[in-house]
Image: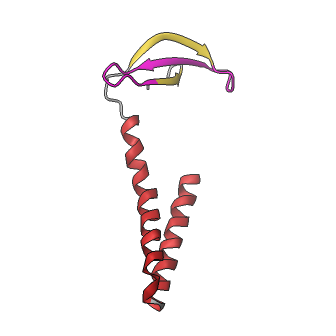
Amino acid sequence: MLRVAVHVLAALFLLCALFVVTQDATAWPMLLVAALFAAGTVFERFHYRGSETKDGEWQATNEKFIDDETGRPVTVWFNPKTGARRYVEAGDPP
């Protein structure tokens, strides 16, 4: 929901910037900032998606514990290729 709101806000900012530039050609910096904001909100999803791929390198460790906030069991997964660790609810894949 928040992601959708940010995309809508970025699109409105870009549309407003386009309108202002058509009225006053010296307002191009506003258009540049709006375009960067819109592009950043779109491409951030692709940047972080790489860490969500199931590349088959993740291995479950023997580390298991109960999360204090949710009260649910958590399993620690380890990627030997990168050294990264993930804390995943028990039963869910990394």
Determine whether 43 is above or below 83 in the image: below
For the question of whether residue 1 can be seen, the reply is no
Q: Range of the magenta residues?
A: 67-85
Identity of the residue drawn at 39% across and 42% down: 49
- Where residue 18 sits in the image (x, y, percent)? 45, 80
- Where residue 41 sits in the image (x, y, percent)? 46, 57
Determine whether 44 is above or below 93 in the image: below
- Where residue 93 sits in the image (x, y, percent)? 44, 24
Identity of the residue drawn at 44% across and 26% down: 94
For the question of whether residue 18 can be seen, the reply is yes
Q: Nearer the viewer, residue 29 or 49?
A: 29
* Magenta run includes residue 28: no
User: Which residue appears farthest toward the bottom when viewing the image?
Assistant: 23
Side (left or right) of 80 relative to 72: left
* Magenta run includes residue 82: yes
- Where residue 54 sits in the image (x, y, percent)? 35, 30
User: Which residue appears farthest toward the top when viewing the image?
Assistant: 62
Identity of the residue drawn at 42% across and 72% down: 32
Q: Nearer the viewer, residue 31 or 11?
A: 31
